[in-house]
Every structure is written in C-alpha cells, then in structure tokens.
C-alpha cells in the first residue's frame, strides 16, 4: 500500500506538531520514524488511522484520499500494534477470537496452526493461549499484539514502540521478522536501535 502525505499541518492548541509536512512511502517498503517525545511520531500514526484530522493538507493511501467517507474502508487495510494493549479481560485465545470475529478479519487465517506457528516464532508457549492476558508480562503482551496484527494480514502495518518491553533476544526475533516482510508497507515508530528500514525519518529536524 502506497502512503502519501501532502503539506500536512497539525496543531494542538498553540503547539504546531506538523507544519507543511510531506511524506511519500512506496508500496511494500518500510519506514522507521524516530524523534524525541512530543515530536509527532504517534500523531503521524493517528493521522494514517484517521483518528487525527489535519488542519491543512491531504493524505492518500494507494491513491485513495483519506477522508470521512473513506476512513472506515481504508482503516480495514491497516494492522496496528500499540505500545501497550488496552486492559483486556479473558485469555490470549479469547482475545484473538474476538479480533477474528470482526467482519473485516473473518477471511483472515486465524487457524490453530497459524497461531501456534507465530507463538513459536516469537517465543510464546502454547499453554499461554489459555492464560489471562492481564497475567502476561508487558513483553508477552507486545508479542501477542504483534501476532494479532500479523494474523489480520493487512497491507499496511503500523508499529508504535512495539518492542519497548521485550527482552533483547525476542526483540531481535521480532525485528528480523518484520524486516523480512516484503508484501507489506510497514511504518515503525521506535527508539530501539537495531531496526532496519528502507527509509528513516527523524522528526527532530521537523521541529528545529
């Protein structure tokens, strides 16, 4: 999925987060976004999800404008991995089952084989499928959130500090796997060193 932002301005009160900001990301390429807190990293992801509307400028995905009429359909093309899962009741399996029940995900492969394959790849034990999500560590919850997004198999993947609580060994596994994805457009917000991407955007320069 191609992503294009043209002359975007975003302001919260008197603070201007983006001023005439433009970005082009080709389909099936990867972008690493870095910068200090408050520089607009998460705001950029919220713009693409349609949760934040720019004061000025235009956003296109695969040539389609992102607006009030298209946001719902375009959002169904996005897999999103937050830094922290919202408070979830129930087990890891129940969480994945709930995600699969959404209309946009019913054609995705949430088979037992697929789920267990991802659990093994990212160092989660099969028995943790039956463990309450609230009992999982922060790093385990982040890996579960990534697995949920990967199972949805959407063309645009947004990662917001998705490895911040993961131990070093598992972090490398996650980074290597994401880097190997050649059939998705991936946007990574991260402080972690070690991420590899086709482009790096340092938002420090947009606020200097």
Image (cartoon, rainbow, N blue to C red):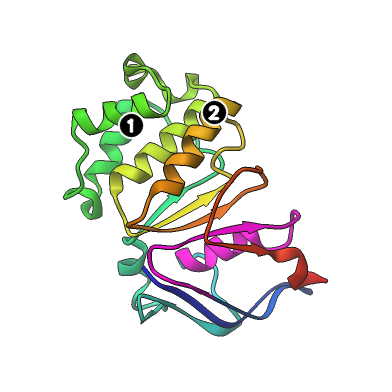
The reply, left or right, for residue 178 in relation to residue 72 is right
Q: Which residue is mark 2?
A: 139
Determine the residue positioned at 67% across, 46% down. Answer: 191
> On the rendered image, what quadrant is the N terminus found in?
bottom left
The reply, left or right, for residue 48 in relation to residue 28 is right
Q: Residues within 10 Å of mark 2 (few under 14, many from 20)?
A: some
Distance CA(mark 1)–CA(mark 2): 15 Å
Residue 145, given in percent of the width and then of the height, sits at 43, 38
Instruction: Please provide the residue range marked out in magenta.
Output: 24-49
Lower position in the chain sequence, tag 1 or tag 2 = 1
Quarter residue 73 falls in: bottom left
The reply, left or right, for residue 195 in relation to residue 67 is right
Q: Nearer the viewer, residue 86 or 188?
A: 188
> On the rendered image, what quadrant is the C terminus found in?
bottom right
Determine the residue positioned at 48% across, 37% down. Answer: 174
Residue 90, given in percent of the width and then of the height, sits at 37, 25
Q: Is residue 31 magenta?
A: yes
Q: Nearer the viewer, residue 112 or 175?
A: 175
Q: Nearer the viewer, residue 23 or 195?
A: 195
Residue 91: numbered disc: none
Instruction: Tell me: residue 124, above or below residue 159.
Output: above
Determine the residue positioned at 55% across, 26% down. Answer: 169
Q: Which residue is mark 1?
A: 118
Q: Is residue 135 magenta?
A: no
Instruction: Tell me: residue 206, above or below residue 170.
Output: below
Q: Residue furthest top?
A: 127
Quarter residue 194 falls in: top right
Determine the residue positioned at 43% across, 23% down. Answer: 123
Quick one: SS at disc 2?
helix
């Amino acid at each position: 999925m191609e992503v294009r932002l043209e002359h975007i301005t975003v302001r919260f009160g008197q603070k201007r987060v983006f001023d005439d900001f433009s970005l082009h990301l080709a389909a099936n390429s990867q972008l690493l976004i870095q910068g200090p807190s408050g520089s607009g990293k998460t705001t950029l992801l919220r713009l693409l999800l349609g949760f934040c509307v720019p004061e000025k400028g235009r956003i296109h995905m695969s040539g389609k404008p992102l607006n009030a009429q298209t946001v719902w359909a375009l959002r169904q093309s996005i897999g999103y991995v937050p830094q922290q899962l919202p408070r979830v009741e129930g087990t890891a399996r129940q969480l994945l089952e709930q995600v699969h029940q959404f209309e946009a995900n019913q054609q995705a492969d949430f088979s037992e084989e697929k789920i267990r394959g991802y659990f093994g790849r990212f160092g989660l034990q099969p028995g943790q499928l039956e463990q309450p999500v609230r009992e999982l560590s922060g790093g385990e919850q982040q890996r579960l959130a990534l697995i949920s997004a990967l199972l949805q198999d959407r063309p645009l993947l947004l990662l917001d500090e998705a490895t911040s609580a993961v131990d070093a060994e598992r972090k490398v596994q996650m980074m290597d796997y994401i880097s190997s994805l050649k059939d998705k457009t991936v946007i990574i917000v991260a402080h972690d060193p070690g991420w590899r991407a086709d482009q790096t955007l340092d938002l420090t320069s947009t606020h200097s």
